[in-house]
């Protein structure tokens, strides 16, 4: 069997860990537009870490190496300079603000494609070259334990064809919602009913990426909320803050006379008497 010639990847040599860690920690406080707000998944990996690690696994380390039937890389000084350039890409890549910054992402994607072409070139004598080493087709990414989907999402962002699966149906649904469905509607114009009273604020000719889909989620979400309010809203009445309440809770003084929305309802029902015949001893009878 012909062995595959694969230069060391950047992740095997060095990483700007402080930068990655700082941004990964910062991400925990992001409350808008983060997948964690779609569903709270235990053991979710930070997007910044997933993005950095994937990039560093896909790009070749520039250092000189030989053996395994090939030579690759540049001298120490030049390698250190090139490595620093790759670190700079990672430093930009991990920032939350750059999550959808096409110029930053494209710089990273270009490096990934360049490294892949180098690997294809090294393996052009491989017997399965046509199948395994097409310089115009990056290898696909597969995550069989995808959980909250941080890793396949970032692989897709970095330009890889991304596949996710998991044993847990909730994880499968999260991954479908994040990775499978949005690309199918990329660039589509929204079709949902515009909420009454809301002028179509986004008069856009084009709806890049998933913006059209996001607008439809907003529109249909509004419609569902309205329907729910019409049908069951009366079961969740507002609460009028009375003088008597304020006497017991002086902190409510500023709300006296106002109707406030209840944020949590506790529903309880006693079923003991519905059980026939009563089971002696079971409910203390
Ligand atoms: C640590 S979580 C993955 C977290 C994920 N990388 C993220 O960023 O959210 C591990 C996942 O492996 C899944 N899993 C465990 N055993 C599995 C199996 N035999 N086949 C498929 N998935 C499995 C679990 O359901 C869980 O979602």
Image (cartoon, rainbow, N blue to C red):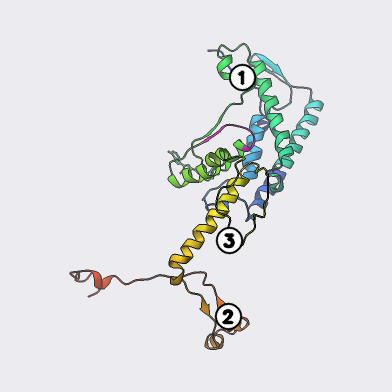
Labels 1, 3: front one: 3
Name the residue located 69 percent from the left edge and 20 percent from the top edge.
Answer: 118
Residue 179 screen position, x and y as percent? 55, 40
Labels 1, 2: front one: 2
Q: Rounded to the nearest whole Å, what is the CA distance between mark 3 and mark 2?
A: 26 Å
Depth check, front residue: 95 or 222:
222
Residue 267: in magenta span = no
Numbered tag placed on residue 258 in the rendering: 2
Numbered tag placed on residue 134 in the rendering: 1
Q: Residues within 10 Å of mark 3 (few under 14, many from 20)?
A: few
Mark nearer the N terminus (1 vs 3):
1
Name the residue located 57 percent from the left edge and 19 percent from the top edge.
Answer: 132
Q: Residues within 10 Å of mark 1 (few under 14, many from 20)?
A: some
Secondary structure beneath disc 1?
loop
Mark nearer the N terminus (3 vs 2):
3
Asked whether residue 205 appears in the rendered view, the answer is yes
Residue 102 screen position, x and y as percent? 71, 39
Magenta residues (range):
157-163
Q: Which residue is mark 3?
A: 196
Residue 191 screen position, x and y as percent? 56, 48
Name the residue located 59 percent from the left edge and 49 percent from the top edge.
Answer: 214
Q: Rounded to the nearest whole Å, what is the CA distance between mark 1 and mark 2?
A: 68 Å
């Amino acid at each position: 069997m012909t062995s595959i010639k694969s230069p060391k990847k950047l992740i095997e040599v060095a990483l700007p860990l402080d930068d990655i860690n700082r941004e990964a920690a910062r991400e925990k406080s992001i409350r808008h537009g983060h997948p964690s707000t779609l569903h709270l998944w235990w053991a979710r990996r930070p997007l910044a870490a997933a993005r950095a690690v994937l990039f560093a696994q896909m790009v070749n380390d520039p250092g000189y190496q030989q053996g395994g039937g090939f030579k690759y890389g540049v001298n120490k000084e030049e390698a250190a300079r090139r490595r620093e350039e790759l670190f700079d890409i990672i430093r930009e890549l991990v920032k939350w603000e750059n999550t959808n910054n096409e110029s930053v992402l494209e710089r990273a994607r270009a490096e990934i494609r360049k490294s892949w072409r180098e690997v294809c070139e090294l393996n052009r004598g491989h017997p399965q070259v046509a199948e395994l080493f097409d310089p115009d087709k990056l290898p696909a990414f597969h995550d069989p334990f995808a959980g909250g989907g941080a890793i396949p999402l970032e692989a897709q962002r970095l330009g890889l064809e991304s596949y996710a699966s998991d044993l847990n149906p909730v994880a499968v649904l999260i991954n479908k919602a994040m990775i499978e469905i949005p690309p199918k509607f990329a660039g589509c114009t929204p079709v949902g009913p515009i909420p009454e009273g809301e002028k179509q604020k986004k008069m856009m000719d084009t709806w890049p990426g998933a913006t059209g889909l996001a607008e439809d989620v907003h529109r249909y979400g509004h419609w569902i909320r309205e329907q729910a309010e019409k049908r069951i809203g009366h079961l969740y009445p507002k609460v009028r803050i009375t003088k008597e309440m304020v006497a017991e809770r002086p902190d409510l003084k500023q709300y006296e006379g106002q109707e406030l929305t209840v944020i949590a309802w506790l529903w309880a029902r006693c079923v003991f008497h519905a059980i026939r015949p009563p089971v002696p001893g079971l409910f203390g009878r």
